[in-house]
Amino acid sequence: MKLPFFRKLSEKKAIHVEQPPEQAAEVQSQESELIEELKSQPVQVEFEKINLKDDKARLAYLDRLYEAIEEAKRQCGEVKFEYGQVTSYLKDIQLIDQAPEEEKTEILTAAAQIIELTEERKRLQRQTYKMTDAQKRALENYEYKVGEDIKKLRGYEDYQMKIRNDLRQLNSEKDLLYADQKSIIRRQHTLKTIGKCLTAILISIGAMLLALVFLFKVDITVPFIATVAFALIILAIILNEARKNRIDMAITEKKCSRAIFLSNRVKIKHVNNTRTLDYMYHKYQVRNAAELDFVYGEYRKAKREWAKQRESTIRLNENNQILMHELGRLGVKDCEIWFAQAKALVEPKEMVEVRHDLNVRRQKLRDQMDYNTGIMEQCLEEMEKIRDESPDYAEEVERILSRGI
């Protein structure tokens, strides 16, 4: 659902004449460039320019900064749980690497048996399934939450489309507002030019009238009154137009400030949503939610076939229990995850790949936390600048920040 402000933008845009194909292609190209820019580098907060002496505007601006801080804090909170899980997996790998030789031998024996039984089950399977080994491992590791993640992923993808539409609308609105500002400035400049020209004309007429009086003793009462009346009318018109331009400029600047605020918020949401999508795609080794849904369906069909291999399953479970017991003795927290990654326990190269994959995931989460932490710091610095302007402002900042305590 779009915000009311975005509905207004849509209605305003509908009033304009439909763009030709060339302009539409240019707009689409600008949108693609904007999205690529957001992907390639973190969005820095574009702070608004407001009149701090305006109490209403200042308090509203502080509220918006606080809202940005709370949003960034919420994003950090959501990422920390997943970050803790990934860190826990890496600690488990370290415990396994540092295990005494006797325990490690038991683990390797059980893992080798698991690998052998798993390969036997694969040979018994006649049907092929359209999923990669990486996707299969991911689905085995997170089978308990794949269905929920598919729904989440679809929601994130739908939200991504809405964010992009909002970005396009805001970008167009900002361009229109900047164009309006330039138009107002041009009109104001034109008024100044007209005023200067009329002043010169009036001075010339006055000089002529004075010349007629002193040289030819002509009565200039009527021309003088007409000239003064004409000058007053023109002056009134110029002053009225200048007043209208000032009002239009003030309104346009407020709209620009609002558009900048909304653009900042939408850009930050775009970055967070894009990184969340990127993380989930990497987590399941898929390109989109549709592929994950398809792969998950293939995986469930494979599970039904694997269930028929009773004898090998029993033996496999026995070795799984042995492995789980040995890992538990080492203090490994997530023992079950190694059932599907037993090959990594036997082959060092596989363990290196597992560790690399976890490090990549953790780095993505850390980058997202660092980004949102940076957003909070920038907003807090902006509030600190406002605090330093006046003791009254400092009290307002303290009151707003105390909401989160």
Image (cartoon, rainbow, N blue to C red):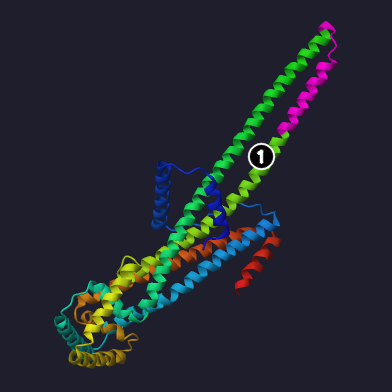
Find numbered disc 1 in the image and state the secondary structure of the residue it sits on.
Answer: helix
Tell me residue 260's x, y (percent): 55, 53
Which residue is more in the foreground, 213 or 16?
16
Tell me residue 398's x, y (percent): 65, 67
Label total for image:
1
Q: Is residue 389 visible?
A: no
Which residues fall within the magenta stretch?
215-238
Tell me residue 160's x, y (percent): 43, 62
Residue in the image at 23% along x and 74% along y: 133
**Magenta residue check for 234:** yes
Residue in the image at 72% along x and 34% along y: 239
Residue in the image at 35% along x and 71% along y: 361
Most common secondary structure along the magenta stretch: helix
**Magenta residue check for 370:** no
Horizontal placement of 207 versus 315: left or right?
A: right
The picture quadrant where one finds residue 224 is top right
Residue 386, relative to residue 93: is it above or below? above
Q: Is residue 147 visible?
A: yes
Residue 131, relative to residue 96: is it above or below? above
* Residue where numbered disc 1 is placed: 245
Amino acid identity at mark 1: Asn
